[in-house]
Image (cartoon, rainbow, N blue to C red):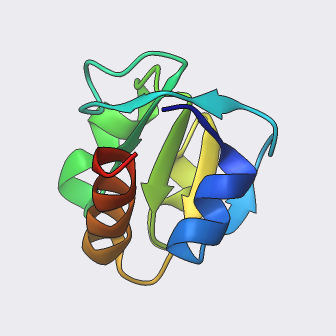
Amino acid sequence: MTLTLEQIAIIINASLSGDPSIKISGINTLTDANSDQISYAVSQKYKKSLVSSNAGAVIVNKKLIEHCPSNALLVENVYLAYAVLTHELKNH
């Protein structure tokens, strides 16, 4: 299943920073993601991986958004947003 960032932002109730038309077809880790995949970062521990990630988009909170080199989906609860997105992708 492929979703645009705009669609994902609606699904996980996120603020989008970047190109809403980017197409995302999967989920991967920050270090392994490519430009058509999404990942997430939950704490400063992942800052180095976030800065060097090739992910097409990253789900982050306000503490990490400044370190996001690509499109970002800003949420309050990263774990919840990631769980909702994973569930949505699995069921389609």
Above or below for 75 versus 46: below
In this image, 12 relative to 45: left or right?
right
Among all residues in the image, which is located at the extreme bottom?
76
Determine the image quadrant of residue 80: bottom left
- Observer able to see residue 9: yes
**How far from the left and from the top, in percent, is residue 51?**
44, 34
Q: Residue at x 41, y 26 (%)?
A: 53
**How far from the left and from the top, in percent, is residue 4?**
69, 41
Q: Residue at x 81, y 37 (%)?
A: 21
In this image, 55 relative to 18: left or right?
left
In this image, 20 relative to 55: left or right?
right
The C terminus lies in which quarter of the figure?
A: top left
Q: Nearer the viewer, residue 37 or 74?
A: 37
In this image, 24 relative to 77: left or right?
right
Q: Nearer the viewer, residue 89 or 27?
A: 89
**How far from the left and from the top, in percent, is residue 28?**
28, 30
**How far from the left and from the top, in percent, is residue 67?**
51, 48
Q: Nearer the viewer, residue 8 or 38?
A: 8
Q: Residue at x 45, y 56 (%)?
A: 59
Above or below for 40 versus 27: below
